[in-house]
Image (cartoon, rainbow, N blue to C red):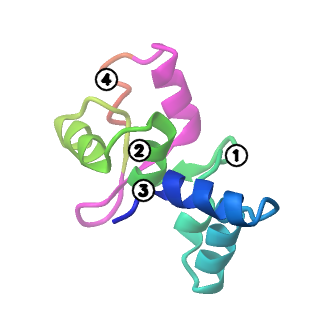
Amino acid sequence: MRDLGAVEQRLCEIEPEFDVLAELREGLARRGVVALADLSRPEVGEILTADQLAHRWQIKVAWIYAKTRSGDIPKVPLPGRYYRYRLDTIEAYERGELDSDERAA
């Protein structure tokens, strides 16, 4: 897989007005991939996926899954083995405002 940053830089050299990320988001949205179409900052009160949280923290999604399983980050359990993350709770966690009991809420 090629580095998206290098691809974007090369495309910008070829076509300075070309916005790779906007084109990528639009292409994903046209294909119905809404959750991945906008990995930018979600609005307050929104629920994040593991991919969005990994993007926010600039880490691998595998780390998010491991910390979710161990109970180290706040999560919202869904049916099955799925979890989501409340943005307002994640922001409180980032500020160090959560106790360990509040993380599994």
Crowd class of label 2 (few under 14; some 14 to 19; many from 20; radius 10 Å): some
- Disc 2 marks which amino acid? Ala
For discs 4 and 2, the disc positioned in front in the rendered view: 2
Q: Is mark 3 on a helix, strand or loop?
A: loop
For discs 4 and 1, the disc positioned in front in the rendered view: 1
Using the image, tell me which numbered label, if any, was put on residue 101.
4
Mark before the other along the chain sequence, 4 or 1: 1
User: Left or right: where does residue 38 sit relative to residue 72?
Assistant: right
Mark 4 and mark 1: span between their CA atoms?
25 Å
Mark before the other along the chain sequence, 3 or 4: 3
In the current view of this chain or complex, which residue is farthest to the front?
Answer: 14
For discs 3 and 2, the disc positioned in front in the rendered view: 3
The residue lying toward the viewer, choosing from 14 and 81, is 14
Q: In which quarter of the image is residue 32?
A: bottom right
Q: What element carries label 2?
A: helix
| Residue to which mark 3 is pinned | 3
Mark 2 and mark 1: span between their CA atoms?
16 Å
Position of residue 43 measured from the top left corner of the image (x, y, whole percent)? 70, 46
Tag 2 and tag 1, C-beta contact below 8 Å: no
- Disc 1 marks which amino acid? Glu
Using the image, tell me which numbered label, if any, was put on residue 54.
2
